[in-house]
Structures are given as structure tokens and as C-alpha cells.
Amino acid sequence: MRVILQENVESLGLTGDIVNVADGYARNYLLPRGKAIVANDRNVKVLNHQKLLADHRRARTVKESRSLAERIEACTCTIAKQAGENDRLYGSVTTMDIEEVLRAEGIDIDRRTIKLDEPIKNIGVFTVDVKVHPEVVAKLKVYVVNKD
């Protein structure tokens, strides 16, 4: 029997897959528990339509994320911190500091999307990754200057 999986089933397939299974397995386990539906013409057409809509939503989201990434890359992020000898900061520049500067520029992002390997502890120019979308990463230049 051909069925369309409604959820991931271990050793069988992922949501949306059309698979062939034994009639008894489908009638006694998959169908009653709502893990699958029969793959007739109507259900296959509905599945294809849902996949098409999901692809359009994903494409629109990626397009919006790319435009946000362009705005982030065009932004200049300057942070003034007090420094001591050898241009070493007394504190450090964290994702919260970068988030505040971007918010002041009109770009509203979550600080968890800013990827710092370690806090910035020196004066200089640093490139920081901002993960706007799983497929889109923006490169932000952060200028750390001495606060006099």
C-alpha cells in the first residue's frame, strides 16, 4: 500500500515522503495513529500543493533575509570602550554591545544571531558573522575605538 507520511517515522521516512508499506502495517499502525494517510490521487495533489506553498514561503524568507544582510553589511558599527596599555580593553565587546549599536541604526536583530568566537578585548577592526537565516550570513565590520 502506498502512503504519505504525516510525520517522521524511524526506519521508514520523513514527513511528506510517499512510501510503499505492507497493507497490515498501514491499516493497523500508521493510519490509526495518524502517522500516514493513503496516497490516492487527491492526497498526492494536496501534498504537492503544500510543498509548492512551502517553497514559495521559504524563497520569500530567504529574499527578505538577504536584503537584511545587505543592510547589516552596509552598517558601520563603532563601539567606544575604555582601553589601557597595548590597546587592551578594560572590559570586552560582547554581542549585547553590538546589538545595541545595530538597534540604534534601525536594524532589529537578536543578539544570539551574532556569532563571536570569543569576546573582543582589543582595539581594532573585527569582522563578525551575523546569521540572519540558516542560509544567509552577513559579515559586519565592528570598529572598536578608545574612549577618551
Image (tube, rainbow, N blue to C red):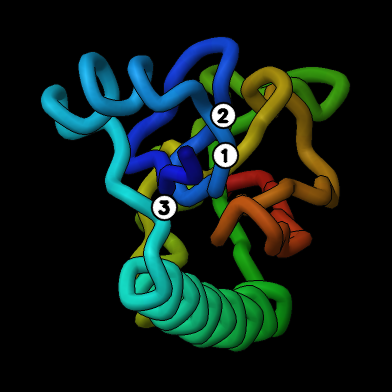
User: In the displayed structure, does residue 121 sit left or right of residue 42?
Assistant: right
Q: Earlier in the sequence, mark 3 or mark 1?
A: 1
Q: Secondary structure at mark 1?
A: strand
- Pick whichever, 114 or 18, lies toward us: 18
Neighbourhood count class around disc 2 (C-alpha, 10 Å): few under 14, some 14–19, many 20 upward: some
The residue indicated by pointer 2 is 13
Of tags 2 and 1, the one toward the viewer is 1
Q: Amino acid at mark 3?
A: Glu
- The mark nearer the N terminus, 2 or 1, is 2
What secondary structure is found at the residue carrying circle 3? helix
Q: Are marks 2 and 1 in contact (CB under 8 Å)?
A: yes
Residue indicated by mark 3: 99
Q: Quadrant of residue 34?
A: top left
Q: Quadrant of residue 108?
A: bottom left
Could you give the CA–CA distance between mark 3 and mark 2, rounded to whole angstroms? 41 Å
Name the mark on residue 71.
none
Residue at 56% x, 53% y is 79
Helix or strand or loop: what does disc 2 sit on?
loop
Q: Which residue is mark 1?
A: 19
Q: Does any portion of residue 97 appear in the rendered image? A: no
